[in-house]
Image: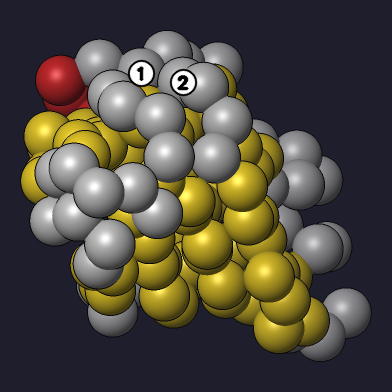
Amino acid sequence: MALTPKRLYIGNDTASNVYTASSNVGSYTIIRTINVCNTSATDKTFSLNVIPSGGSAGANNKVISNVTVPANDVIHSDSVYVLNAGDALYYDPVDANITLTVNGVEYVA
């Protein structure tokens, strides 16, 4: 199998796992870019966690914590995150009206 570039998630869900890497042994996902767009006239806040397979969101796996996105603005992150088989990305938009877009590559064994 090859690495497959793709949009891993786009949306503005309530707090939830928004992407889970394939659980096939040897699979992984590399998150390359994260954009968070605030479509409202007031500042909004969000957090992200990278949750190990079988785990849950908590302070021990939070990678972005309570970041404020200014009104009608975008925050862009080029940080690279690797999700091993079965790991998940958890998005917690503390406020509504912010859209998360995650792009990266998948390797499914």
- Indicate which label's residue lies in the foreground, 2 or 1: 2
Residue furthest to the right in view is 1
Q: Amino acid at mark 1?
A: Ala
Badge 2 density bin: few <14, some 14–19, many ≥20, Cα 10 Å? some
The residue wearing badge 1 is 57
- Asked if 97 appears above or below 93 in the picture, the reply is below
* Residue plotted at (52% across, 62% down): 101
Task: In the rendered structure, find residue 15 and report the number of the disc placed on it.
Answer: 2
Q: Is residue 63 visible?
A: no
Residue 41 in picture, x, y percent from top left? 25, 49
| Alpha carbons under labels 2 and 1: distance apart | 10 Å
10 relative position to 77: left or right: right
- Asked if 47 appears above or below 100 in the picture, the reply is above
Residue 54 in picture, x, y percent from top left? 55, 17
Q: Looking at the rendering, which quadrant does residue 94 occupy?
A: top left
Secondary element at tag 1:
loop
Count all numbered tags in the image, as a single digit.
2
Residue 50 in picture, x, y percent from top left? 38, 39
Secondary element at tag 2:
loop
Residue furthest to the front in view is 41
The quarter of the rendered structure image containing the C terminus is bottom right
92 relative position to 20: left or right: left
Q: Is residue 45 visible?
A: yes
- Asked if 32 appears above or below 93 in the picture, the reply is below
* Residue plotted at (40% across, 54% down): 39
* Residue plotted at (46% across, 21% down): 15
Q: Are marks 2 and 1 in contact (CB under 8 Å)?
A: yes
Earlier along the polypeptide chain: callout 2 or callout 1?
2
Q: Which of these two is toward me, 81 or 96?
A: 96
Q: Amino acid at mark 2?
A: Ala
48 relative position to 20: left or right: left
